[in-house]
Amino acid sequence: MLQRALGSGWGVLISGVLLGVLGFVGLSAETWRGLIVLGLLLSCIMIWHRQLRHFVLLPSAFALIGGMILVMMNVKLMG
């Protein structure tokens, strides 16, 4: 049941809320890059794991949203 629930938009929503909270902490760009790399590595590992495969949306959404926040930080610094 939990697999079906997280297979939909809940995976993106959970990652988005967590990253929204981290966005207000004021992390540096290097920390964001580390979180993105961690999300991508976890996605690669979870694809080949039989039971964790169903939850691969969590770290991949984490990496995607983290990248979007990093781009917004860079635009804010340049403009």
Image (tube, rainbow, N blue to C red):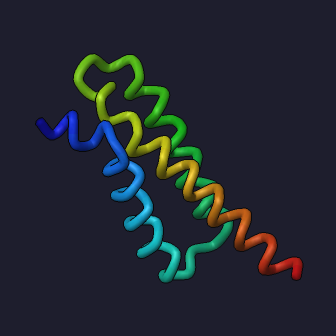
Residue closest to the eye, 44 or 5: 5
Farthest residue toward the left?
Answer: 1
Residue 6, position as x, y percentages in the image = 27, 42
Farthest residue toward the right?
Answer: 79
Residue closest to the eye, 23 or 8: 8
Please name the residue shown 20% across and 34% down the image: 3
Which quarter of the rendering shows the C terminus? Answer: bottom right
**Picture mark count:** 0
Which quarter of the rendering shows the N terminus? Answer: top left
Taking the image as shown, residue 17 lies to the left or right of residue 69, namely left
Residue 57, position as x, y percentages in the image = 41, 39
Please name the residue shown 28% across and 28% down the image: 52
Residue 53, position as x, y percentages in the image = 33, 25
Residue closest to the eye, 5 or 68: 5
Taking the image as shown, residue 74 lies to the left or right of residue 18, namely right
- Compared to residue 25, the image places residue 45 above or below, namely above
Query: Toward which corner of the image does residue 58 lie, by quadrant?
Result: top left
- Compared to residue 7, the image places residue 64 above or below, namely below
Residue 71, position as x, y percentages in the image = 73, 63
Taking the image as shown, residue 73 lies to the left or right of residue 64, namely right
Please name the residue shown 21% across and 35% down the image: 4
Query: Toward which corner of the image does residue 51 lie, by quadrant?
Result: top left
Please name the residue shown 48% across and 81% down the image: 25
